[in-house]
Amino acid sequence: MSDAVTTAMREVSRADFLPESVKHLAHYDGPLPIGESQTNSQPYTVAEMLRLLEVHPGHRILDVGAGSGWTTALLAYLTGGAGTVIGLERNANLIGPAREALSSYVEDNARIDEATAGILGAPDEAPFDRILVSATAPRIPQSLVDQLADDGIMVIPVATTMKRVRRRGGQIEVTDHGQYRFVPLVED
Protein backbone atom coordinates (compact mmCIF):
# COMPACT_ATOMS: atom_id res chain seq x y z
CA MET A 1 0.00 0.00 0.00
CA SER A 2 1.38 3.40 -0.97
CA ASP A 3 -0.02 6.29 1.05
CA ALA A 4 1.22 9.34 2.95
CA VAL A 5 2.24 7.22 5.96
CA THR A 6 4.27 4.82 3.79
CA THR A 7 5.97 7.79 2.14
CA ALA A 8 6.71 9.41 5.51
CA MET A 9 8.25 6.20 6.82
CA ARG A 10 10.41 5.94 3.72
CA GLU A 11 11.55 9.58 4.00
CA VAL A 12 12.15 9.69 7.78
CA SER A 13 14.73 6.99 8.48
CA ARG A 14 14.18 5.05 11.71
CA ALA A 15 17.95 4.45 11.87
CA ASP A 16 18.60 8.15 12.46
CA PHE A 17 16.61 7.94 15.72
CA LEU A 18 18.31 4.86 17.13
CA PRO A 19 21.42 4.51 19.31
CA GLU A 20 24.55 3.37 17.44
CA SER A 21 24.32 -0.06 19.08
CA VAL A 22 21.03 -0.90 17.32
CA LYS A 23 21.14 1.22 14.12
CA HIS A 24 21.92 -1.91 12.11
CA LEU A 25 18.53 -3.31 13.22
CA ALA A 26 16.51 -0.33 11.94
CA HIS A 27 14.65 -2.46 9.38
CA TYR A 28 13.63 -5.00 12.03
CA ASP A 29 9.85 -4.88 12.45
CA GLY A 30 9.88 -4.93 16.22
CA PRO A 31 10.58 -2.56 19.09
CA LEU A 32 14.23 -1.61 19.67
CA PRO A 33 15.85 -0.32 22.89
CA ILE A 34 16.76 3.38 22.99
CA GLY A 35 18.00 3.43 26.60
CA GLU A 36 16.42 4.28 29.94
CA SER A 37 14.21 1.14 29.65
CA GLN A 38 12.39 2.73 26.70
CA THR A 39 11.92 1.51 23.15
CA ASN A 40 11.51 2.80 19.61
CA SER A 41 8.21 1.21 18.59
CA GLN A 42 7.71 -1.46 15.95
CA PRO A 43 7.37 0.17 12.50
CA TYR A 44 4.18 -1.77 11.69
CA THR A 45 2.57 -0.49 14.88
CA VAL A 46 3.70 3.10 14.27
CA ALA A 47 2.28 2.99 10.73
CA GLU A 48 -1.05 1.65 11.97
CA MET A 49 -1.27 4.34 14.64
CA LEU A 50 -0.45 7.09 12.14
CA ARG A 51 -3.11 5.84 9.74
CA LEU A 52 -5.70 5.82 12.53
CA LEU A 53 -4.68 9.38 13.41
CA GLU A 54 -5.51 10.69 9.90
CA VAL A 55 -2.98 13.53 9.93
CA HIS A 56 -3.50 16.32 7.40
CA PRO A 57 -1.27 19.23 6.41
CA GLY A 58 -1.57 22.13 8.82
CA HIS A 59 -2.65 20.10 11.86
CA ARG A 60 -1.51 20.94 15.41
CA ILE A 61 -0.33 17.67 16.91
CA LEU A 62 0.73 16.51 20.36
CA ASP A 63 3.06 13.48 20.50
CA VAL A 64 2.97 12.07 24.05
CA GLY A 65 5.92 9.77 24.78
CA ALA A 66 8.16 11.08 22.01
CA GLY A 67 11.03 8.80 23.08
CA SER A 68 13.60 8.79 20.28
CA GLY A 69 11.81 11.55 18.35
CA TRP A 70 10.98 9.29 15.39
CA THR A 71 7.20 9.64 15.72
CA THR A 72 7.55 13.42 16.17
CA ALA A 73 9.52 13.59 12.91
CA LEU A 74 7.00 11.38 11.10
CA LEU A 75 4.14 13.56 12.32
CA ALA A 76 6.00 16.71 11.23
CA TYR A 77 6.48 15.21 7.77
CA LEU A 78 2.76 14.37 7.55
CA THR A 79 1.52 17.76 8.75
CA GLY A 80 3.97 19.69 6.57
CA GLY A 81 5.53 23.07 7.15
CA ALA A 82 2.17 24.68 7.92
CA GLY A 83 1.53 22.33 10.85
CA THR A 84 2.95 22.15 14.36
CA VAL A 85 4.08 19.09 16.32
CA ILE A 86 4.95 19.15 20.00
CA GLY A 87 6.63 16.00 21.25
CA LEU A 88 6.66 15.40 24.99
CA GLU A 89 9.07 13.06 26.76
CA ARG A 90 9.34 12.42 30.52
CA ASN A 91 12.85 10.96 30.46
CA ALA A 92 15.26 13.89 30.31
CA ASN A 93 18.14 11.64 29.16
CA LEU A 94 16.30 10.82 25.92
CA ILE A 95 15.46 14.40 24.99
CA GLY A 96 18.91 15.55 23.80
CA PRO A 97 19.45 12.70 21.33
CA ALA A 98 15.81 12.96 20.16
CA ARG A 99 16.13 16.70 19.52
CA GLU A 100 19.39 16.19 17.65
CA ALA A 101 17.89 13.50 15.40
CA LEU A 102 14.73 15.59 14.85
CA SER A 103 16.78 18.63 13.79
CA SER A 104 17.91 16.79 10.61
CA TYR A 105 14.31 16.49 9.46
CA VAL A 106 12.49 19.63 10.56
CA GLU A 107 13.19 23.31 10.89
CA ASP A 108 10.72 25.04 13.14
CA ASN A 109 7.42 23.16 12.86
CA ALA A 110 8.29 20.49 15.44
CA ARG A 111 9.99 20.32 18.81
CA ILE A 112 10.48 17.95 21.73
CA ASP A 113 9.92 19.26 25.24
CA GLU A 114 10.35 17.65 28.62
CA ALA A 115 6.96 16.69 29.99
CA THR A 116 5.94 18.53 33.14
CA ALA A 117 5.59 16.31 36.22
CA GLY A 118 2.00 16.11 37.37
CA ILE A 119 0.58 17.31 34.04
CA LEU A 120 -0.44 14.98 31.23
CA GLY A 121 -0.09 16.53 27.81
CA ALA A 122 0.26 20.25 27.16
CA PRO A 123 -3.00 21.87 28.27
CA ASP A 124 -1.53 25.39 27.99
CA GLU A 125 -0.92 24.79 24.26
CA ALA A 126 -4.23 23.04 23.52
CA PRO A 127 -6.36 22.49 21.58
CA PHE A 128 -4.75 19.91 19.30
CA ASP A 129 -6.17 18.48 16.09
CA ARG A 130 -4.43 15.18 16.78
CA ILE A 131 -2.85 13.51 19.82
CA LEU A 132 -0.65 10.42 19.52
CA VAL A 133 0.16 8.54 22.73
CA SER A 134 2.94 5.95 22.55
CA ALA A 135 2.50 4.42 26.00
CA THR A 136 -0.22 2.27 27.57
CA ALA A 137 -2.76 3.98 29.78
CA PRO A 138 -5.00 2.08 32.20
CA ARG A 139 -7.96 4.11 30.87
CA ILE A 140 -8.55 6.93 28.39
CA PRO A 141 -7.18 10.03 30.17
CA GLN A 142 -9.87 12.71 30.34
CA SER A 143 -7.17 15.38 30.57
CA LEU A 144 -5.99 14.43 27.05
CA VAL A 145 -9.54 14.23 25.68
CA ASP A 146 -10.01 17.78 27.02
CA GLN A 147 -7.00 18.90 24.93
CA LEU A 148 -8.57 17.74 21.65
CA ALA A 149 -9.99 20.34 19.29
CA ASP A 150 -13.48 19.84 17.90
CA ASP A 151 -13.27 16.97 15.39
CA GLY A 152 -9.90 16.08 16.94
CA ILE A 153 -8.58 12.52 17.07
CA MET A 154 -6.42 10.79 19.66
CA VAL A 155 -4.83 7.36 19.20
CA ILE A 156 -3.82 5.69 22.46
CA PRO A 157 -3.20 2.15 23.69
CA VAL A 158 -5.43 1.43 26.69
CA ALA A 159 -4.51 -1.74 28.56
CA THR A 160 -3.74 -3.89 25.49
CA THR A 161 -6.24 -2.36 23.05
CA MET A 162 -5.48 0.43 20.58
CA LYS A 163 -8.20 3.06 20.92
CA ARG A 164 -9.15 5.82 18.50
CA VAL A 165 -10.92 8.67 20.28
CA ARG A 166 -12.72 11.34 18.24
CA ARG A 167 -14.22 14.47 19.75
CA ARG A 168 -17.18 15.92 17.83
CA GLY A 169 -18.87 18.77 19.56
CA GLY A 170 -19.70 17.49 23.01
CA GLN A 171 -19.66 13.85 21.91
CA ILE A 172 -16.77 11.42 22.25
CA GLU A 173 -16.58 8.41 19.92
CA VAL A 174 -14.23 5.54 20.85
CA THR A 175 -13.38 2.64 18.57
CA ASP A 176 -11.06 -0.35 19.13
CA HIS A 177 -8.27 -1.29 16.71
CA GLY A 178 -6.39 -4.41 17.74
CA GLN A 179 -4.12 -5.60 20.52
CA TYR A 180 -0.71 -4.01 21.20
CA ARG A 181 1.91 -3.81 23.96
CA PHE A 182 3.63 -0.59 25.01
CA VAL A 183 5.56 0.74 27.98
CA PRO A 184 3.28 2.23 30.66
CA LEU A 185 2.12 5.85 30.43
CA VAL A 186 3.33 7.97 33.35
CA GLU A 187 0.38 10.16 34.31
CA ASP A 188 1.74 11.99 37.35
Image (tube, rainbow, N blue to C red):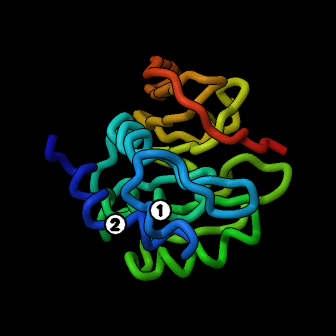
Quadrant of res 152: top left
> Residue 116 is drawn in which quadrant?
bottom right
Q: Nearer the viewer, residue 26 or 140?
A: 26
In the rendered image, the quadrant that contains the N terminus is top left
Local crowd size for mark 2, using a 10 Å CA cut-off: few (<14), some (14–19), many (≥20): many
Residue visible at 41% across and 46% down in the picture = 29
Q: In which quarter of the image is the C terminus?
A: top right
Element at badge 1? helix
Using residue 137 as the reference point, say whether residue 179 is left or right of it. left
Q: Can residue 173 be seen in this view?
A: no
Task: Kindly check if marks 2 and 1 are in contact, taking CB atoms under 8 A apart as contact.
Answer: yes
Q: Where is residue 94 in the image (x, y as percent from the top left)?
A: 68, 69
Residue type indicated by callout 1: Trp
Instruction: Answer left or right for 153 relative to 137.
Output: left
- Residue for badge 1: 70
Query: In the rendering, at what x and y percent does residue 34 appear?
Result: 62, 62
Q: Which mark is residue 12?
A: 2
Tag 2: amino acid: Val
